[in-house]
Image (cartoon, rainbow, N blue to C red):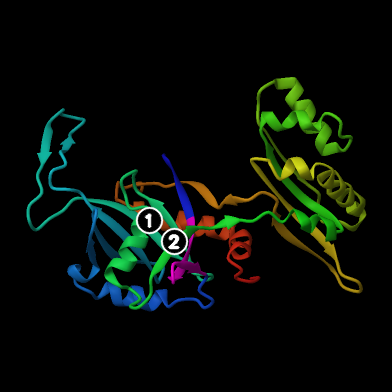
Amino acid sequence: MKERTVGFYEIVTVKAGEARRIPELMDWDGALADLSRAPVEGRSHEGDSHLVGSVRTYHMQDHLLLHRVKDAGEWLSVLNFDTGHLRELEQTAQEGYLDTSVICFLSFGNVVGIMQGGVSAPSHKGLETWLNGIGLFPGSQLQLRPVVAHSEIEKLKTASGASRVEVKVMANKLGALSDRRGGLARTLHVAGESYGEISVTMIISVPKKKVLREHRERLLADLEEISDVVTGAERARARLVYSDPGGPEHTRLVELVEHSITAKKRVPATDAEGNSIRIMSAVDAILGAAAEHEDALRLAVDAGDL
């Protein structure tokens, strides 16, 4: 089963050549409902490519399918693997073959999750072109930009501990840890010395028990010791513990490296009976990835807490 990438993008507005965050959540549900009733010409835009939108309802929620209509000059064939029979496909004036992307609008921050069905399916730039081309929100010039998890390395200074640390360090960064004495640094450095030109991914989790408070404090201290290396790591995140005077402890997931938020997901194309479920699978994958990364997504687009 092939893995596909889920990408997350924030929809912003462009005024006087400047991209600006939209402070309120746009009415995507209403827009999709209107779109579902529109004729094909009302959902189509022709520019460098012919783009058509359609709406699919799944679990009582509308989602967008954005299609690129293959050019009539593209050579398309179908091969029967049992018989070896090859059949040429020819487009008629009333039909078109499509490359499709699945798009889910999240419930916060004007964020969309996109999964392309293939390399030539519409990207986020295609969605941007289509949204503006059909005037889904008249009078607005929209732009899509990748949602970037911003580094919050300064949050280490105000935390009282760390209950979980996940870090991926490439080989060229491991040498900088040779003179550090903390547990994280020593473990990463030893792995690099033992196995040579490698990348190391480490996850350390401390259970939520009062008696393990010192362990969480030590893990935070070890993380702070290598903060200069962590900010240049391939991936680094931590669930930090905060102690409010007179109140209970609470935790917060922080991203320690700036990066575009994406996820790899396996997407079944058919069910046990051979029926196509690829669109439903894609929606489930996008929404699942959004739930997994919701903390980071909300933080990146300033959408507040859950």
Of pointers 1 and 2, the one earlier in the residue sequence: 1
Residue 144, which numbered label?
2
Identify the image quadrant of residue 168: top right
Three-letter residue code for mark 2: Leu
Is there a contact, CB below 8 Å, between mark 1 and mark 2? yes
Q: Is residue 245 above or below residue 215?
A: below
Q: Residue under label 1, please give it.
A: 125
Residue 96, which numbered label?
none
Magenta residues, dominant SS class: strand
Quarter of the picture holding the N terminus? top left
Please tell me which residue is depicted at 77% across the width and 56% down the height of the picture: 154
Secondary structure of the residue carrying numbered label 1: helix
Please tell me which residue is depicted at 70% across the width and 42% down the height of the picture: 167
Residue stretch rendered in magenta on the structure: 8-20
Q: Where is residue 287 in the image (x, y as percent from the top left)?
A: 49, 60
Left or right of 152? Residue 122 is: left
Residue 12 belongs to magenta span: yes
Three-letter residue code for mark 1: Lys
